[in-house]
Image (spheres, rainbow, N blue to C red):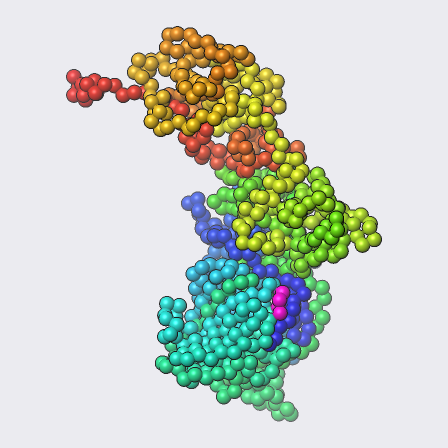
Amino acid sequence: MTLETLPGRLTWLLAAALCVGTLAPVPRAAAVTPPLANTTGGPPVGAVLDLPDDGFVQGDVLPAAAADGRSRTTLLWKSALFETPLEFAIDEIARIRFPPRPAPAPRPGAWRFDLRGGDLLIGMLEAIDGDSVTVDAGAASGPLRIKRSWIERMTALAGDAQAIVPGRLDGWAMPQGGWEEHAGSLTCSKPGATAVRAIDAPARACYDLRLSWDDRPDFDLAFAVAPGAADRKAAEAEIYRLEANGGDLLAIREGGVAKFDVADGIAAGAGRLRLQVFVDQERGRLAVVVPEGELAADKPIFDETLAPRKASAGGGVAVKLRKGNLRIDSLRVSDWSGAEARLEGDTGLGGPTARLESFDRTTGEFVVRDGAETRRVAATAVPEIEFPEVAAPQPGAPPASPVLIAFADGSRLTGALLDITATAIRIDSPMLAAPLAAPREQIVSVEAVGPRGSRPLPGRIGLLETPTCRMLGCLVNPAAGRGLSWQPRGCVGPVPFGDPPAAARITYRGIGMLGGVGIVAAKQGTHWVVTDMPAGEPAARDGRLEPGWRIEAIAPVAGGAFVPAEPLRLEEMRALLRGVSGSAVQLKVADAEGRAHEIVLVRDAQGRGDLAGARERDVLDKALALQDTTTGSNRRPSTALPKIYLKTGDSLYGTVLSADAEGIRVKTDLADNLLIPAVAVRAVELLESDSKSITKEKLARLLTLPRLQQADPPTHMLRLVTGDYIRCKLLSLDERQVRVRVLEETKVLSRADVARLIWLSVAGDGSPPQPLAAVGGAAGLPVQGLMTDKRRLTLAAARLEGDRLLGTSGILGAAGIDLGGCTSLLVGPAIQETDRATLPYGQWILTPAPPPKVLQEAAGSGG
């Protein structure tokens, strides 16, 4: 069996001879793919920019000029959420998806040109010479000259051979999801995900597959699958199947009986494999050939025939991933006409020695040289032409940020992005004699296929979410007088929010965006030592760290406090190295000679390590919680302090100095004597209480306003430490006592006997909007922070000092939100979308008791 180990994960295929390159990373199983439609009910969205970590942002790609003779490494993206365009580094995006475009019907006489490395073009053949093939392709606004050294084969679209991958995903059924197109391959990393493709294959067919992976997979391949075969009983099916289990490849031919055999083992780690699977449904034959690599041979590794019980039923293919990750890099289905399990090795021009010299477009004939003779062959008589491998010209260094453009007709081409205009995207491909100007109306997607970039973000990372956006990033200080800005992961600079800002949520805890640095460490004596750095993960890509070096200390947030490594347990070491994808960790290490180094690494999803079946968000939350504890960043105000709740939903800790009808005066960490107006106060918890929750029936009785009090309703509810409640009007509160009026009587209570003081409102009195109006008017980004200790704080944010977001509250004055203790931020109109009834003490609204029935009946009769 053939297996080649891959040194990396690139898809820029620049090599001579076989043109074998490295492979692109398998993306993680995505969340719900955002639709190419405006979810807010507005006009259709121009495009969607897909980002790593299941992110996306709707909008459109903007024109971008050429970069002084160099290929572009960034692109400009317009989103309605931000005041200015976002400039994304190409190596930190996933792809741009344009609105769905119908696949045009192939023109009569069209050809498919498969290029070495997986690219392909579809078009009409114009000319052939010794250096190039000229094609009129829908992917270009004019003729394209393809270098012959890059052409693998050309196939008449009217012929029997079918190329399924690369190709559009329209014909695939994926009931469990998890499969997606990436850099021209069909990829999956979700265990249990199945992809099924119905194919109009001949009864005697060859399925030619190229598979690759980053982590040895277990998978099933089924061939000659009939429509609805998944619902049939196994005893009724004619089975032609391959199974990969723990490195073994099992071939199975089953009908009335079964025959199977185990082929050579598949080595662990990254690898690839090419298989030619021959199926003869007329005779019931299955033969498997490995055509490439050190173990390649003409003799099949499996060749068994069992007389089928019924006529051929289908020609489809089914793939199921059970473990690891898998890419289908190519899948071609062609007619198998010979007796032996092999495809004919000639060029399609009448013999193995025939060579294509030129094409006469006038007569529609190929000029073929066979030895010393020259002859003409009608193009309509040639289904396929294989181009012999020749030494390709040295292409030079690959571009910094290659992209793959996919077109509506199924064409795809890899190259360096030169520029973008309103009508075209121009790329430079080594396979073409000149740059390609691709019309935008023909483009389905533009995908980044080079090595991933790794740039740290300058602040605490959160997940920004709106109906049109989901992206990791951080808040940053305003620049050049603009408002507080957002720095998305992968952007070369920050962008200010729109004015007014759209409703959004920035989440800091409870997200499934786990990243790691790709370091395996073990305790050797009293020291932690790096034992491995898996290829392609952050530490290995960075290149400064080496196995055998000691880890002396870790700062889980680069630039923050260091934690000594020596006393750490294994789970603590892992937790400090993990964090939100895109965040940076700083290491103090010692090399083999004892020299000290400090290294900053950016975490990503590839380096997160084995989760042992745990949920990603749970692992991340535990890691962040441990980091807060070890670095001391989770210090909170003492819970012995009273807690004040506002009608905005805000709450704060402070010392209650006094209270009266005007409001309450408190001392906080930002103010020694702050007056909070009574109209804004909802409740004060003066003492901690172990009381049981109040029953619905008792709450209803307490909140029913008697008819005798409706002209002058009570304004407060006291809860005593005994659990009793008193409806009253607050007269005053000081450090020793509480004075209230109950009906017409003044009562004086010891403050030590009062656990809570609740400000009441009456249903329909219009009071809830009043405190909200008090919040407005201040300059800054309106935000509401939801804290890990269940507090909320609303303010107009103006700037950041470290991880502290500072601004102004219309009620509290100067205020700040510690992002380190923040679970999420509500932005703009999202603050108003909170259901007030769900806020603490939001249900304490008096409802007037109805009048007696006799009065209701009298009013109803008009008496």
Q: Quadrant of the C terminus?
A: top left
Q: Which residues are magenta?
A: 267-271
Residue 16 appears anywhere in the view = yes
Please name the predominant secondary structure of the magenta segment in the image: loop
- Residue 544 visible somewhere in the drawing: no
Q: Reply yes or no: does residue 589 show up in magenta.
A: no
Compared with 335, 215 (above or below) is above
**Which quadrant would residue 271 be assigned to in this image?**
bottom right
Percent coordinates x, y for residue 350 in the rendering: 55, 88
Look at the image and tell me in which quarter the N terminus lies: bottom right
Horizontal side, residue 718 vs residue 851: left or right:
right
Image label count? 0
Q: Residue at x 64, y 62 (%)?
A: 9
Front-most of 152 and 585?
585
Identify the residue at horizontal 19%, vertical 18% (top origin).
854
Q: Position of residue 782 (x, y in %)?
A: 54, 32
* Residue at 39%, 80% in the rendered image: 256
In the image, residue 857 lies at what x, y percent? 18, 21
Residue found 49% across the figure and 71% down from its top: 221
Q: Nearer the viewer, residue 468 or 32?
A: 32
